[in-house]
Image (cartoon, rainbow, N blue to C red):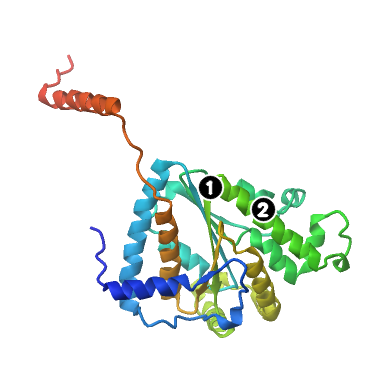
């Protein structure tokens, strides 16, 4: 049974207004310091939020079925965040109602030697979802302007022409890489794949508490790595890299949304709502059947009904 969402038109209007503020409009600066890391709105309570998430998951599942049947578009969802921001939990909760046969989650780790022998977008292009399916990048091609920017020594592993030392990696290098990413996403979009990108904006204090929780909970010890502390020490550098990247690569074809991530219940609702909104804009529908096909379907139905009316002969 479909979840019934009980809220007023005024609440719905205010909610979608709040969601619209999460986008980084193309050509504007991200200004992460001015964006909330927790839910500051007045529309939702946790109880209403839970009902909204259930409703949204069901709607997304319905549209996934149409996406597959329509077979003209693919959907790519990119998730970027600092450690412990809640990417895995968001994927688990929001995608719980989807048909797993039509969804592929790709988590990009350090590139292999084969991948380093190609351009930095090569392995991401191979992981794109086909038409009719949903692809989720848990970390994405943006690692190449985030982690690599904070750790420019990683770029040297790519053996790029004219890049022989960190001194060769200037601002123009990153601007060119942003341009490559925008071009890549434009080609993907024009080929029929809808791209939605989320940055889960968690505060440094909330991350601290979540990392401690991973240490205190034996079942979550495996999630903690000492390297998390090293990266946490580079927080300021990462925030700079994120601001530069978000500002340079949010486009009409592939927008960025900054999701307040300190409150997990809200971040999941916000992500699901944006996905629902974008899928709805695709105007997905089931393929129409011609009159001739309808006649053949009715003939097939008569044949199947006749089988029920005619007793089968027992095997001799």
Regarding mark 1 in the picture, which secondary structure is present there? loop
Residue 44 horizontal side relative to residue 246, left or right:
left
Looking at the rendered structure, the number of numbered marks drawn on it comes to 2
Q: Residue 228: which numbered mark, if any?
A: none
Residue in view at x 69 percent, y 72 percent: 241
Regarding mark 2 in the picture, which secondary structure is present there? helix
Residue 283 horizontal side relative to residue 149, left or right:
left
Mark 2 lies on residue: 183
Q: Residue 36, how many percent across, how many down?
A: 52, 81
Indicate the quadrant where residue 170 lies.
Answer: bottom right
Q: Residues within 10 Å of mark 2 (few under 14, many from 20)?
A: few
- The one of 38 and 33 positioned closer to us in this rendering: 33
Q: Quadrant of the C terminus?
A: top left
Mark 1 lies on residue: 129
- Does residue 263 lie above or below 277 as drawn? below
Whether residue 233 is visible, yes or no, is no
Q: Nearer the viewer, mark 1 or mark 2?
A: 2
Q: Residue 122, how many percent across, how many down?
A: 68, 49
Q: Residue 190, how many percent across, how many down?
A: 57, 47
Residue 54 horizontal side relative to residue 270, left or right:
left
């Amino acid at each position: 049974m479909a979840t019934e969402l009980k809220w007023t038109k005024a609440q719905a209007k205010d909610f979608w207004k709040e969601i619209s503020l999460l986008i980084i409009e193309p050509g504007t600066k991200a200004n992460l310091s001015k964006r909330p890391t927790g839910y500051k709105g007045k529309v939702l309570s946790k109880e209403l939020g839970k009902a909204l998430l259930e409703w949204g998951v069901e709607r997304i599942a319905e549209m996934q079925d149409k996406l597959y049947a329509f077979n003209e578009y693919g959907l790519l969802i990119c998730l970027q965040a600092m450690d412990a921001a809640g990417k895995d939990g968001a994927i688990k909760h929001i995608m719980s109602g989807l048909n797993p046969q039509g969804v592929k989650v790709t988590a990009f780790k350090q590139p292999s030697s084969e991948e380093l022998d190609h351009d930095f977008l090569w392995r991401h292009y191979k992981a794109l979802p086909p038409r009719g399916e949903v692809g989720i990048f848990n970390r994405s091609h943006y690692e190449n302007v985030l982690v690599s920017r904070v750790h420019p020594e990683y770029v040297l592993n790519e053996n790029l022409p004219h890049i022989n030392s960190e001194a060769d990696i200037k601002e123009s290098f990153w601007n060119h890489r942003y341009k490559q990413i925008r071009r890549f996403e434009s080609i993907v979009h024009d080929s029929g794949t809808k791209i939605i990108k989320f940055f889960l904006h968690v505060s440094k204090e909330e991350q601290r508490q979540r990392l401690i929780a991973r240490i205190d909970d034996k079942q979550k010890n495996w999630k903690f790595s000492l390297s998390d502390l090293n990266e946490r020490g580079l927080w300021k550098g990462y925030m700079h890299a994120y601001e530069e990247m978000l500002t340079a690569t949010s486009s009409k074809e592939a927008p960025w949304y900054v999701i307040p991530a300190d409150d997990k219940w809200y971040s999941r609702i916000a992500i699901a709502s944006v996905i629902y909104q974008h899928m709805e804009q695709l105007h997905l529908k089931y393929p129409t059947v011609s009159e001739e096909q309808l006649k053949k379907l009715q003939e097939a139905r008569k044949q199947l009904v006749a089988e029920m009316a005619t007793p089968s002969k027992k095997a001799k």
